[in-house]
Amino acid sequence: MMMADGMFGAIAIVMVVGFFGFFFVVAMALFRVVGTLFRRLFMIGGGDDSARPVSFATRNVHCRNPQCRHTNIPTARYCARCGQRLAALEHVDQHG
Ligand SMILES: [Zn+2]
């Protein structure tokens, strides 16, 4: 009887440890995902200022105005110098 009780207790302990280990792994994964989402939302929400430092390794956007050619940050939609619209997502027609 004592051996059976000991085995049952050991199995219960293993099950509890396994459950908490699984819970810990899931909690860590959720924490990481939520942190990434929060950081992304925060960056989108406050990323419209021109004073934002260029921290990504993406390519800069050059102004299409031939008399300006200002190098803008990758997230810029309009040229910081002359106000020319930067059509970064459209295809650039080269004639002209
Ligand atoms: Zn420009």
Image (tube, rainbow, N blue to C red):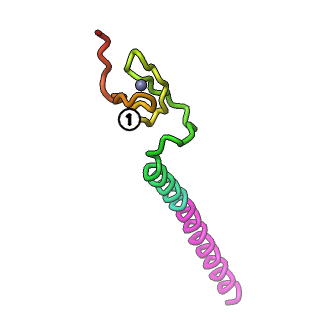
**Does 93 appear in magenta?**
no
| Secondary structure at numbered mark 1 | loop
Q: Name the residue at 67% across, 78% down.
A: 10
Give 12 or 53, whichever is nearer the viewer.
Answer: 53
Q: Which residue is mark 1?
A: 77
Give 70 or 61, whichever is nearer the viewer.
Answer: 70
Q: Name the residue at 32% across, 12% down.
A: 94
- What's the residue type where badge 1 is placed? Arg
Decide if residue 47 is on the left or right side of residue 14. left
Residue 59 image position (x, y, % from top left)? 49, 27
Q: Is mark 1 within 8 Å of ligand 1?
A: no
Q: Name the residue at 41% across, 16% down.
A: 67
Quadrant of the drawing holding the C terminus: top left
Give 56 or 8, whichever is nearer the viewer.
Answer: 56
**Does 2 appear in magenta?**
yes
Asked if residue 20 is positioned above or below residue 90 in the image, the reply reads below
Quadrant of the drawing holding the N terminus: bottom right
Tag 1: Cα neighbours inside 10 Å, few (<14), some, or many (≥20)? Answer: some
Q: From which residue to which does the magenta span run?
A: 1-28
Residue 81 image position (x, y, % from top left)? 45, 29
Decide if residue 45 is on the left or right side of residue 29. left
